[in-house]
Image (tube, grey):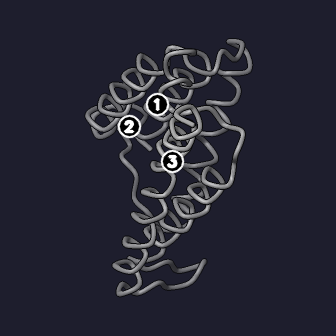
Amino acid sequence: MEREIADRRGKLRSRLPAAVLIGLGLAALYVASSLPFGTIRQPDSGFYPTLVCVALIVFGGLALADPARPSPREEASASGGHARVGLVAAALAAYAWAITPVGFLVCTAALLVLLLRGIGGVSWLIALAAAAIGSAACYGLFTQLGMPLPAGVLGF
């Protein structure tokens, strides 16, 4: 009986972050709905926040629906997850600090290499190729949408 109660609490704890993510996504979507959305060709100030909110809700729903996943505590201790989370947080802080002086392309490529190689364990060749293609594709997409990106050391 006690084991069953502990299992239920463990399942609840493992699903709580997903439920919180869905709640935050819904709350942010409510706020973003007051902003003008625009169109795909001419996005307005509500375009990007709305897309991010929808992604949060979808991924939170997927995480909530996955019954076989281990609890976050089990997963973190089994795979060194706490150190990885710290590394990602530090990398994102460095990215935010360096993007203006260094530039979008260089910072994004470096971040992708770190995430793919350092966290994902992808080979150097694949990580470098994916980082170059991914950062160039993001740059092209965002500039086509009319978003100014920091040029930095490359000058564009």
Residue 20 lies, in percent from the top left, at 42, 57
Dot 3: within a 10 Å radius of its alpha carbon, few (fewer than 14), some, or many (20 or more) residues?
A: few
66 sits to left or right of 34: right
Q: Earlier in the sequence, mark 2 or mark 3?
A: 3
Which of the numbered marks, if any, corresponds to residue 12? 3
Disc 3 secondary structure class: helix
Disc 1 secondary structure class: helix
User: Which of 6/137 is in front?
Assistant: 6
Residue at coordinates 57% horizontally, 61% vertically from top-left? 55
Residue pointed to by mark 1? 106
Residue pointed to by mark 2? 103
How many numbered marks appear? Answer: 3
Residue type pointed to by label 1? Val
For residue 69, above or below residue 129? below
Is label 1 in contact with label 2 (beta carbons under 8 Å)? Answer: yes
Residue at coordinates 72% horizontally, 13% vertically from top-left? 123
Dot 1: within a 10 Å radius of its alpha carbon, few (fewer than 14), some, or many (20 or more) residues?
A: many
